[in-house]
Image (cartoon, rainbow, N blue to C red):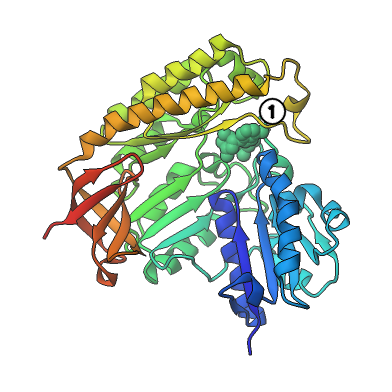
Amino acid sequence: MSKKYYIETLGCAMNVRDSEHMIAELTLKEGYEAADSLEEADLILINTCSVREKPVHKLFSEIGQFGKRKKDGAKIGVCGCTASHLGEEIIKRAPVVDFVLGARNVSKITEVLHRPKAVEVDMDYDESGYAFGEFRTSLYKAYINISIGCDKQCSFCIVPHTRGEEISIPADLILKEVQKAAGSGAKEIFLLGQNVNNYGRRFSGEHPRIGFTQLLRAVSEIEEVERIRFSSPHPLHMDDEFLDEFAKNPKICKSMHMPLQSGSSRILKSMKRGYTKEWFLERAAKIRELVPDVSISTDIIVGFPGESDEDFEDTMDVVEKVRFEQIFSFKYSPRPMTPAKDFEKQVPEEIASKRLTRLQARHNEMLDEMKSVRLDRVYDVYFEELRPGGYVAGRTDNNWLVQAKGSEELLGKTVRVKIVEASRLGSIGEVIA
Ligand code: 5AD
Ligand code: SF4
């Protein structure tokens, strides 16, 4: 009987991709199969996130529970960003853990598996070790890494310490990977990096220096590719050439993630974001002007050290002006190894909570206003998933989630859908013709 793995993936799309990578290695090299439950697994992997403190706390109680539930002899591995950041401390605090594998080291999964109490968290990058795993969570969509790490050093962010310096993957490798994925049914390609539109600044060897805009163009020239998405771009690198390509290239989906973090230029400076409130507003207005039906999503941190009421009002002002279609909002969480944790004037928890509640409540109101715009309109929806009750789910080009009555035969197809019900979180549509 083959061995079974159980994997829990926390955090961002990058982690989803890293999990796919590990599954591919385990399947191809060790003959593993997916377990139906944790209790049945021979190998339990937790792919962790360390961007905020809460999930790190939760990790240790989870390891404890998994340790009790696992079958005798099953191994537990902690992977991803918290593995990079805490390293061997994880095994010291939780001896039930068999190995620790950093976010930059996931291709070594089959190696650490056989080394008792292995801790593999080095920050080197060896191109030959970069295998694009053959496993995809979805048949219809492929996540493809274009760069690893981040050089930005935003003062609140632990990622440069967990994922290391930023290195772009050579374009010819990416394009081969896209070709392979699209040729096997993934008509939607999702390009991934911590800072995607900084692509091409540094490679690990001698490679043709193409930038992100050129890479987008090259991906779109692959015939089988129908849709291109990418995450996350940095507002600072949204130059005109990039925005023009975004607007004009019909294969690039019209949804843009623009992580604001704060609307106050003073706070942005202290965060080391490299742009001002005005720059952000101008870029967002330009995107809306070039692509009227665009969706803009964002990340916002409230309660960053030194954030005054006035600074927070600046954030609310940007929210009013840009009218984001989606906001991921967080209370500032002090992280080890980041300068901001030592800044003066840390904002009290109650104030940060109040600001977060106000931001989210106002945004919900805005979403309620926006959703009516969708009603009765017809969108192209690319269906990717079966849902209970005879439904299929997919997304519009501008990233609205839509469900419609239907079955397998709609999966992997782009279909005209009329929206008949719209809510904040998603819409119900009817397939037409
Ligand atoms: N505290 C709160 N939120 C954070 N993020 C990154 N670091 C922190 C932190 N220390 C948020 C940012 C980023 C998103 C992925 O997580 O908004 O864009
Ligand atoms: Fe963190 Fe800033 Fe890099 Fe994003 S751009 S990963 S927030 S350091």
**Quarter of the rendering containing residue 296:** top left
* Any part of residue 209 in sight: yes
The kind of residue tagged 1 is: Ser
Where on the picture, by quarter, is residue 245?
A: top left
- Give the left or right position of residue 116, taking residue 327 as reference: right
Can you give x and y, in whole percent of width and height, for residue 430 in the image? 17, 55
Mark 1 lies on residue: 155
Taking the spot 72% from the left edge, 61% from the top edge, the residue there is: 65
The yes-or-no answer for disc 1 within 8 Å of ligand 2 is no
Q: Nearer the viewer, residue 270 or 307?
A: 307
- Please provide percent x and percent y for residue 44: 68, 68
x and y percent of residue 410 in the render?
26, 66
Residues packed near mark 1 inside 10 Å, few (<14), some (14 to 19) or many (20 plus): some
The N terminus appears in which quarter of the rendering?
Answer: bottom right
- Looking at the image, the residue that sits furthest to the top is 310
Q: Position of residue 79 (x, y in %)?
A: 71, 58
**Residue 235, placed above or below residue 29:** above
Q: Quadrant of residue 415?
A: bottom left
Q: Nearer the viewer, residue 167 or 64?
A: 64
- Name, please, the residue furthest toward the bottom: 1
For the C terminus, which image quadrant?
bottom left
- Looking at the image, the residue that sits furthest to the left is 433
Check the image and report above or below for 161 versus 41: above
User: Residue visible at 74% across and 42% down?
Assistant: 161
Task: Give the farthest residue toward the right.
Answer: 92
Q: How many marks?
A: 1
Image point (28%, 62%), residue name: 391
